[in-house]
């Protein structure tokens, strides 16, 4: 089926090589790649066809900042660093943007983790290029110097008895001071965004549906890890917030981050791919319900 016949457009990203995952062996990409330029159909649940595009994103803070905001444009724009890959993967560029963007990263052994919240700050770990997230400059706080003659209200000042000298204590030994880490994360252009942003997807219902479909190894997570998957989550959600105006009667792009385990710990790549299909199908079925409701309201 040609992608132009699809009702919904989903973009799935996965991270590329890093640390022990060389070449294309990142478990996230191994599970995502089979979805490249595919159509998901679920006639049993009357879900409209979904075209799935895939992209591999470098494990780099700068790459995320370069690539992700452009993917949220209408239509999406491909940064020069991924343009050749987008062409090779036949990545769609829907005029109204993607309906659903799913970012996939790798975590430790265990079940799939569907992340709920993304963080603005706290990115101290280095990416594959040995770089950290940008330092966010904070305005210095003006502090009035203390007046030695001031006595706090409610404190009784007792002078030494006449003829006696006040006792002067020896100054304490200086204690080692740990260096203060600079705040790293999202700075200029993100001043009006909260320190935590949340996905609009009803993750509890999503997980319940996945388990009803027979996929048990999945749970909701409130800690995306303050690394690249968390970073791309915040960047992506911020663009959704930025693009949707309060007066517009339309829904925004849905965004999720899912962490997958290393291959075989305990899930195979094929099992993870199946789980990603379940996630895509359920989210798009929810979008279909929203769209049908909005369509009815327009004709009333």
Image (cartoon, rainbow, N blue to C red):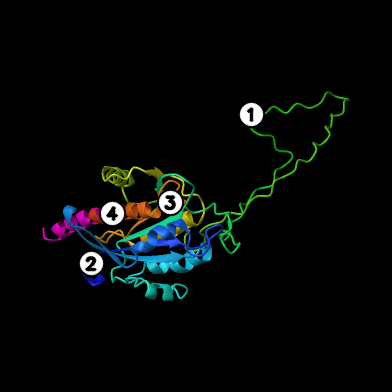
* Mark sitting on residue 259: 3
Residue that carries the numbered disc 2 in the rendered image: 6
Asked whether residue 164 appears in the rendered view, the answer is yes
Q: How far apart are marks 3 and 2 (CA)?
A: 27 Å
| Mark 4 burial class by Cα count in 10 Å: few <14, some 14-19, many 20+ | many
In screen coordinates, is 18 left or right of 261? right
**Above or below, 168 relative to 276:** above
Q: Are marks 2 and 4 in contact (CB under 8 Å)?
A: no
Earlier residue among tags 2 and 1: 2
Q: Is mark 1 on a helix, strand or loop?
A: loop
Q: Distance between the residues labelled 4 and 1?
A: 61 Å
Q: Is mark 3 on a helix, strand or loop?
A: strand
Discs 1/3, front: 3
Could you tell me residue 158's position as x and y percent?
75, 26
Discs 4/1, front: 4
Could you tell me residue 288's position as x and y percent?
21, 57
Residue that carries the numbered disc 1 in the rendered image: 154
Q: Are marks 3 and 2 in contact (CB under 8 Å)?
A: no
Residue that carries the numbered disc 4 in the rendered image: 283
Earlier residue among tags 1 and 3: 1
């Amino acid at each position: 089926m040609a992608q132009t016949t699809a009702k919904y457009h989903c973009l799935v990203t996965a991270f590329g090589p890093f640390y022990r995952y060389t070449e294309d062996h990142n478990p996230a990409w191994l599970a995502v790649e089979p979805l490249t330029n595919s159509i998901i159909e679920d006639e049993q649940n009357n879900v409209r066809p979904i075209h799935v595009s895939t992209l591999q994103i470098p494990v780099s803070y700068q790459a995320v900042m370069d690539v992700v905001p452009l993917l949220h444009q209408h239509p999406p724009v491909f940064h020069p660093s991924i343009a050749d890959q987008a062409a090779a993967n036949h990545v769609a560029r829907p005029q109204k943007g993607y309906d659903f963007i799913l970012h996939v990263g790798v975590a430790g052994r265990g079940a799939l983790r569907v992340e709920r919240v993304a963080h603005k700050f706290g990115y101290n770990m280095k990416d594959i290029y040995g770089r950290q997230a940008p330092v966010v400059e904070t305005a210095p706080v003006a502090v009035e110097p203390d007046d030695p003659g001031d006595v706090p209200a409610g404190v009784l000042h007792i002078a030494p008895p006449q003829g006696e000298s006040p006792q002067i204590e020896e100054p304490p030994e200086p204690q080692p001071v740990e260096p203060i880490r600079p705040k790293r994360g999202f700075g200029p252009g993100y001043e009006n965004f909260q320190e935590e942003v949340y996905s609009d997807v009803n993750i509890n219902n999503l997980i319940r549906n996945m388990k009803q479909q027979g996929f048990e190894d999945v749970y909701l997570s409130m800690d995306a890890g303050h690394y690249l998957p968390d970073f791309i989550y915040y960047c992506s959600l911020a663009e959704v917030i930025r693009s949707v105006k309060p007066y517009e009667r339309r829904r925004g792009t849905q965004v999720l981050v899912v962490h997958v385990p290393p291959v075989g710990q305990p899930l195979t790549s094929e099992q993870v791919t199946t789980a990603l299909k379940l996630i895509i199908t359920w989210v798009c079925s929810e979008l279909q319900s929203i769209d049908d409701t909005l369509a009815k309201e327009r004709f009333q």
